[in-house]
Every structure is written in C-alpha cells, then in structure tokens.
Amino acid sequence: MKAILVNGSPKSNGNTAIALAAVGDALRKRGIDTETIEIGNAALHGCAGCGQCSEKKNRRCVFDDDMLNRNLDALFDADGLVLGSPVYYSGVNGALKCFLDRAFFVSGANGNLFRHKVGAAVVAARPADSELHRREVSNRDVVLCLDVSDSMTDTSVDLVEAYAAVVDGLDGERVALSVFNSRSVTIFPLTDDYDFVSEKLDEVAEWLSAPFSYWDDVQLSTFLGVLDLDGYYSSLISDGLAMCVDVFDHPELQRSRSIIFATDNELNGEPLVSLDQAMAMAKQAGAKVYVIDPYMDILPSEGREIKLAVEAIGGEFFETYGEATVHDVVRQITSEPATPLQLPPRLVVTDHPGFGAVLAWLGVLALAATCLPVVRHRRASRGKAGGGPDV
C-alpha cells in the first residue's frame, strides 16, 4: 500500500511540510509506504479548459513542459492521497490549485482514475482568537514649529537638537513637527512613537546641515516643500504659526496643547494673517505658545514685536535654546494636566498553538485509522475481481 503526499507550500521546510511529515510518520508506522511530491516552487500551467485530455484519453495533460504529467502515474496508482497547503485567503495556494485542476480533469477524462482512493487534506493555519482592544491614554499635545528660512540657517540645526532634547524630557505626549518658510509642511503629525520622532528629527537636522550653495538651498527647500518658486522668495512668519495651530486634532476636546515656535520673526512677503491674528488663533485653540528667538540681539525690533505678541496671549518668550530653556519648557508643559484620549481600536490576535497541535495529531490518527481498512478492502475487492485497476 502506498500514499502520495503532495506539498503545495513554497517552503520545503515550513509548517505544511512539518504537518505532512507527521502524517507520513503515522502512515509508515501502519505499514503504508509514502512518497512526497514538492510542487510549491514549480512553474505550473493553469488549466486552459481546452478539452484535449478528453479527446486523446491518454492519461496526460496537453501541457507537457511542467511537472504534472511526470507525476500523474504515481497519483493514479497510489492507494491514498494527502494534500498539504498553506491557507491563502481561505483557500489553497496557487501552485496546488493549478496542479489539482489539471489532474482532476485528466482523471475525469480517463474513467475517473481517482475513484475509490482515500483522500485527506493537511492545511497550515493557526488556531487563534481575535479581540478588538479599545485604548485610552492620558497625555498632552506638543507641536514643534520651526522657521527654516535662510535667515535662520546658522541656528536651525541647533534648534532641531533642542527640539530633540525637549522630546527626551517628555513621557507619552503626542508630538508633531511643522516647518515653514513661504509655505508650511508637516514633517510628521501628532504621534507618541518617539523612535519615529527621533528618526525624523535626525533627518531634518541632516537636511539643514548639508553644505550647499544658493541653488542647492533652493533645491533643498523645494524638497521640503516650504519655498514657493513660482513667486518670490518670502518668509511668512505668522502664516507658519497659523498652520502649526492647524496641526492639532480633536478640536472638540479640551486638551493641553503647546507650540514651541522657533523663529527670528524676520518677515519677507505678504502673509495671509498678521502675527497678532495667528497668536489669537493659537489662544482660541487652547494652545500655549513658547517662542524661541535666538536673534533678539541682531533683530531687536522683530524680537520685541513677537515678544509682546506672545506675552499678550499668556505665552513665553526665550532668547536662547540651551539646556535651561529646554528644562523650563518641559517643566511647564508637563505641569499641565494630561487629558484622556481615545486611540483607534487595535485588533489583537492570540495564537493557540497547543490546541492546534492536538487537533493535528487527532487528524493524523484518524487518517491512519481510516486509510488502512479502506485500502485493505480495496485490495481485497481487486483480488476477487481478478486484479487490474479500477476504471
């Protein structure tokens, strides 16, 4: 007696192969020979529905350039077939589907050559439970708002590093980064994935520290999306702040919101909103603004203007971005009450490998117990009829 094991998985040492090997061991212990056919990585034609197998009745498929025909006799002569496959979208994989479609057509065209054979299926899937977990966290929102105009070149990288130091002092707060010149670009939205935040801050620092001529500067700014090359070179401070206010989500919630706004306030161009209007927008959104102006001594009038504007809405003004400033900003942000926030639900899938293993071994034992008496009965029937294959 012999059983053919067909492995449809492209992984010759994967879960399907392990399951088939377990079946093969159980069958051999019962005195049944086994042979395994690996088809997972084979290039196999799909059935063309041409009908040539019905016309020729030669126990062959018309496609003779792949592995099907050279394995058909072994399949037809076997006493049992065990088909193994990974589960792809609730079905067998493509290679096994092509193999079986054509084999079944040839069998049917030649007198049902698979009739009376014992068949079994082995699939590689995972018994698991799934549960939708709803998550709630209590945190605060912080938008890092950076002026990347040409006048900020000498300090822009240092300011990004100061932002990184602020993030290091936070614990669970959602952080976003927006950069602006004549346009604003959100580098990343509010997130509490600090590894991602650190990675993106490093990228921005690398962009801003790269040596470049004026035209390289234009190309870099174009890449960031903050320079309007269709118009003239401009630096729109108040519009940049207004767009940073727009980064906050859930306007219906009363949350702790902060904007760390680094700029020299050197305006160049016609903004859509004034500085006072942008500050009023921040206040209306419930955001406290922390202005860092490292050029107060060079541009005193611009510095005084933004200092008065931010203090008028209860914000803070800093002339430096060193350790003391970072510590003070972090202290003030974290002193505000954290607010609960419902996060998107997360699907949690829990595997139960032990339960699956029990089912697999029960299946193997059931297959072996079924296969042996059926094959013996078939052999006995053949002997009484004088031998020869069933047709």
Image (cartoon, rainbow, N blue to C red):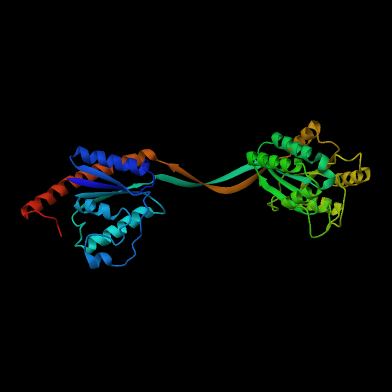
In terms of image quadrants, where is residue 210?
A: top right
* Nearer to us in this view, 245 or 44: 44
> Is residue 113 something that shows in the picture?
yes
Residue 378 appears at what percent x and percent y?
A: 13, 51
Give the left or right position of residue 272, taking residue 385 as reference. Answer: right
Residue drawn at 60 percent across, 47 percent down: 343
Residue 335 appears in the picture as rendered? no
Residue sitting nearer the eye, 279 or 8 = 8
Between residue 47 and residue 141, name the one nearer to us: 47
The structure residue drawn at horizontal position 43% and vertical position 45%, both measured from the top left corner, is 129
Q: Is residue 32 left or right of residue 242?
A: left
Between 145 and 388, the residue placed more toward the observer is 388
**Which image quarter: residue 337?**
top right
Give the residue at x 19% y 49%.
79
Quadrant containing the C terminus is bottom left
Q: Quadrant of residue 315?
A: top right
Spot the residue most to the front: 65
Point out the image quarter for the N terminus: top left
Q: Is residue 20 above or below residue 47?
A: above
Residue in view at x 42 percent, y 41 percent: 351
Q: Is residue 320 above or below residue 38?
A: above
Q: Position of residue 160 (x, y in %)?
A: 75, 39
